[in-house]
Image (tube, grey):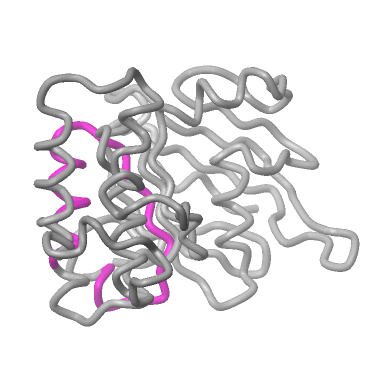
Amino acid sequence: MPSPPASAAETASAPETVRLSGVGFGYADAPGILRDVNLILPRGSFHFLTGPSGAGKSSLLRLLTLGARPQTGRISLFGSDVTDIARRDIPAFRRRMGVVFQDFRLLDHLSAFDNAALPLRLAGGREVGQDADVEEMLKWVGLGRRMDARPPALSGGEKQRLAIARAVINRPGLIVADEPTGSVDAAMADRLLRLFQSLNRLGATVLIASHDQALAERSGARVLHLHKGGLYEAAA
């Protein structure tokens, strides 16, 4: 049976952002993608999630972002059990998260600036300084000259960077990213990693699913590995 990746000492010393207890998940044509998964992410921790294609990384992220429900076990987010959460309560939890999807999920009719600003708008309209925050974030991810461009005019790498900017613009308590550096070069990957690390130092809990083992090693973060439905901590 896989053991919880976080140690008992960490659990005692830091409040939890995420706890999965005995979680199982699968589909009709692919049962047992996840089996008896236990996971604890203390508040302010930074983890990479690795594993071969089809190991269940995206499925695990879907569970954490309330896009799916576990078939067995329990899930807690920010100290609240969300296993059987009512659909009407999901948006409140998602507003506390920043999610980077593999398929970006940008709004094609909005400019890059307005896509990045959307979480701030949804959280409370236009406050003083918000536009400057959005501009600074877009410059950080290398889109300072593309603020007025709409997603159809952006390259795949530019879309990915825009999706990251949108996900982290409101400094969420939990950042979940699915292959966030998959379409950028090594230099930009390192730059984006520094952005995630900066937000982590400000208190965000970060979980990045990635095939980039070298990036995970450079990050200094703890590495979790999915294998045959189980979740394990990778050897140091």
| Residue 114 image position (x, y, % from top left) | 31, 44
Q: Nearer the viewer, residue 217 or 118?
A: 118
> Is residue 137 toward the left or the right of residue 119 in the image?
left
Residue projecting furthest to the right: 28
What's the magenta region? 191-216
| Residue 106 image position (x, y, % from top left) | 45, 55
Quarter holding residue 96: top left
Residue drawn at x 32%, y 20% as measured from the top left: 125
Q: Nearer the viewer, residue 18 or 186?
A: 186
Quarter holding residue 44: top left
| Residue 65 image position (x, y, % from top left) | 55, 40
Q: Is residue 116 above or below residue 34?
A: above
- Residue 214 counted in the magenta span: yes
Q: Is residue 86 above or below residue 46?
A: above
- Residue 32 counted in the magenta span: no
Residue drawn at x 38%, y 41% as measured from the top left: 98
Residue projecting furthest to the bottom: 185
